């Protein structure tokens, strides 16, 4: 048995109509039987309406059941999957129904609404299940995580129970189990366990916080990225120009081949026309001579009869020689004879033109056959050249990397830096130890002040410093000085 989960849908009506009817029709020839789950006694045609109503009222059902209404909203409530058996299994309807109900329980949809239909339109029997992922009482959405893995393990147990062995499914499930066990352990713990060492207690998970990139590093990376894009854009223009030149050269080669073929066909037609030109000239000369002779027979009945009898095969055309009944009108009527002769001449010209056309067509087909062979060879060669050119250009474009753009920026930055000014060279002769001692005695360095004397000096200076005056005190002192300089001019509040 092969379970297959289809993509989640949004329309219960479309899904239910699909499994209840034939493809694109209203008939139900392929439907063997239909079952429902948690849909009461409603008809199969109205099952979609009940499931849609449950989904629409999911919030009210949550509130009524006391379930929190937070979380992601269910926008795709339709779950559609199939269970398929091999053509040789030939399961009974009861067996298929039992498997369908068990599959719903495996997915945790045992209490959900579902519509089940068996189809007979393929060689292998199969069942379609359309389930509502919204619970009809709590309004909660079913947890369908790892549904395919659950189905795979259930199918393996089902096949083991019924004596069926699918080696590939067994191997895949075992690999999933090993991967799941490996995820539970740290690699170091696995190594210690394999070595016989008792692993330590597992440390609690500590999330690694994202380390923000500095503004300077971000701008530097952005600048390098923009330079890389600019370099690639410039290179893309150059590569496109090279591809355009290659395409133009290939187009000229194809046009030259077309021109060569058409020229060969024109030459062949000219040769055929040259071959048939004498025949056309003789035909028109003989027909003109015969037409003038028939015109002279207008007044001689006996000569017309002799002419008609002698040319009865030509006058009959493709139908064969003229009968006596057909010859009599031509003998008695000069006008009908001239008309029949004109028709005969037209048929002869058509026959020669048809012969020329047939030979020309054979020559043209041979030329175009040769053209197609040469064109296929040319196309394969040009295609190989373009593919080789694209491969080389792709490798060249990959060379324009982040590191190359960074190196280019560094080189430009170094070129833009001003050259350092040359320092003046001052010659200082080497001194002997005796000369150094004499220089130190002659020019002694200034003595460093004692730390205690420096502290006492700073304290005295700070004690004698005038304290900072407030703005009001500054105004008051200024007015006192003004009164001393301008005695008798103080009017009190008027100032």
Image (spheres, rainbow, N blue to C red):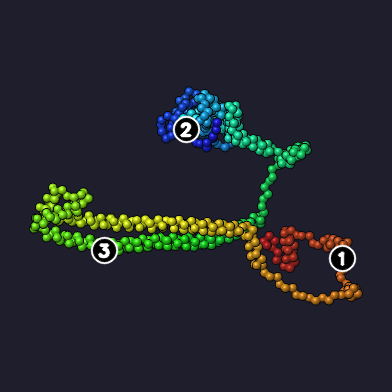
Q: Which residue is mark 2?
A: 122
Q: Residue at x 81, y 62 (%)?
A: 465
- The percent position of residue 106, horizontal first and vertical second, equals 58, 29
Q: Which of the two labelled residues, at mark 2 and mark 3, occupies the earlier sequence position?
A: 2
Alpha-carbon span between mark 3 and mark 1: 135 Å
- Nearer the camera: disc 2 or disc 1: 2
Q: Residue at x 61, y 58 (%)?
A: 399
Q: Which of the 4 image quadrants contains residue 369?
A: bottom left
- The percent position of residue 146, horizontal first and vertical second, equals 60, 35
Quarter of the image that includes the N terminus? top right
Disc 2 is placed on an element classified as loop
Answer yes or no: is residue 437 visible.
Answer: yes
Horizontal relation, residue 74 to residue 438: left or right: left
Q: Residue at x 60, y 34 (%)?
A: 167
Is the residue marked by circle 2 packed among few (<14), some (14-19), or many (20+) residues within 10 Å?
few
Alpha-carbon span between mark 2 and mark 3: 72 Å
Horizontal relation, residue 278 to residue 160: left or right: left
- The percent position of residue 391, horizontal first and vertical second, equals 55, 56
Q: Which residue is mark 3?
A: 278
Quarter of the image that includes the C terminus? bottom right
- Nearer the camera: disc 3 or disc 1: 3
Disc 1 is placed on an element classified as loop
Q: Which of the 4 image quadrants contains residue 252?
A: bottom left
Q: Which residue is mark 1?
A: 449
């Amino acid at each position: 048995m092969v379970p297959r989960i289809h993509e989640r849908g949004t329309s219960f009506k479309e899904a239910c109509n699909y499994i209840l009817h034939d493809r694109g029709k209203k008939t139900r020839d392929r439907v063997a039987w239909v079952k429902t789950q948690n849909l009461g006694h409603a008809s199969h045609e109205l099952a979609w309406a009940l499931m849609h109503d449950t989904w629409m009222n999911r919030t009210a059902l949550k509130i009524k059941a006391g379930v929190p209404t937070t979380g992601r909203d269910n926008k795709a409530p339709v779950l559609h999957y199939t269970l398929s058996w091999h053509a040789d299994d030939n399961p009974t309807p009861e067996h298929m129904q039992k498997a369908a109900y068990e599959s719903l329980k495996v997915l945790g949809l045992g209490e959900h609404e579902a519509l089940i239909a068996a189809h007979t339109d393929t060689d292998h029997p199969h069942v379609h299940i359309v389930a509502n992922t919204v619970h009809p009482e709590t309004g909660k959405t079913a947890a369908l995580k790892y549904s395919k893995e659950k189905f795979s393990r259930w199918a393996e147990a089902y096949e083991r129970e019924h004596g069926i062995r699918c080696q590939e499914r067994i191997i895949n499930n075992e690999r999933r189990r090993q991967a799941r066990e490996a995820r539970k352990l740290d690699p170091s713990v696995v190594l210690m366990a394999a070595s016989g060492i008792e692993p330590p207690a597992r440390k609690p998970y500590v999330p690694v916080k994202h380390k923000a990139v500095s503004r300077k590093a971000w701008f530097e990376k952005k600048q390098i990225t923009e330079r890389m894009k600019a370099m690639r854009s410039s290179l893309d223009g150059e590569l496109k120009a090279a591809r355009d030149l290659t395409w133009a050269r290939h187009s000229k080669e194809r046009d030259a081949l077309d021109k060569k073929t058409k020229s060969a066909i024109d030459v062949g037609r000219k040769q055929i026309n040259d071959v048939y030109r004498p025949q056309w000239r003789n035909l028109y000369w003989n027909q003109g001579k015969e037409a003038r002779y028939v015109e002279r027979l207008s007044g001689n009945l006996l000569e017309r009869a002799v002419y008609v009898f002698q040319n009865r095969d030509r006058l009959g055309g493709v139908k064969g020689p003229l009968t006596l009944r057909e010859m009599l009108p031509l003998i008695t009527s000069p006008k009908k004879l001239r008309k029949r002769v004109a028709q005969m001449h037209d048929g002869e010209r058509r026959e020669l033109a048809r012969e020329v056309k047939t030979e020309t067509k054979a020559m043209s087909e041979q030329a175009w056959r040769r053209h197609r062979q040469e064109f296929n060879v040319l196309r394969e060669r040009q295609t190989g050249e373009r593919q080789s050119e694209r491969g080389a250009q792709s490798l060249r474009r990959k060379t324009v990397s982040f590191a190359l753009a960074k190196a280019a920026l560094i080189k430009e930055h170094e070129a833009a830096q001003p050259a350092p000014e040359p320092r003046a060279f001052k010659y200082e002769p080497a001194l002997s130890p005796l000369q150094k001692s004499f220089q130190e005695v002659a020019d002694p360095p200034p003595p460093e002040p004692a730390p205690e004397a420096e502290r006492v000096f700073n304290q005295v200076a700070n004690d004698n410093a005038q304290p900072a005056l407030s703005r009001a005190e500054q105004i008051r002192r200024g007015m006192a000085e003004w009164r001393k300089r301008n005695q008798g001019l103080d009017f009190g509040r008027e100032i």
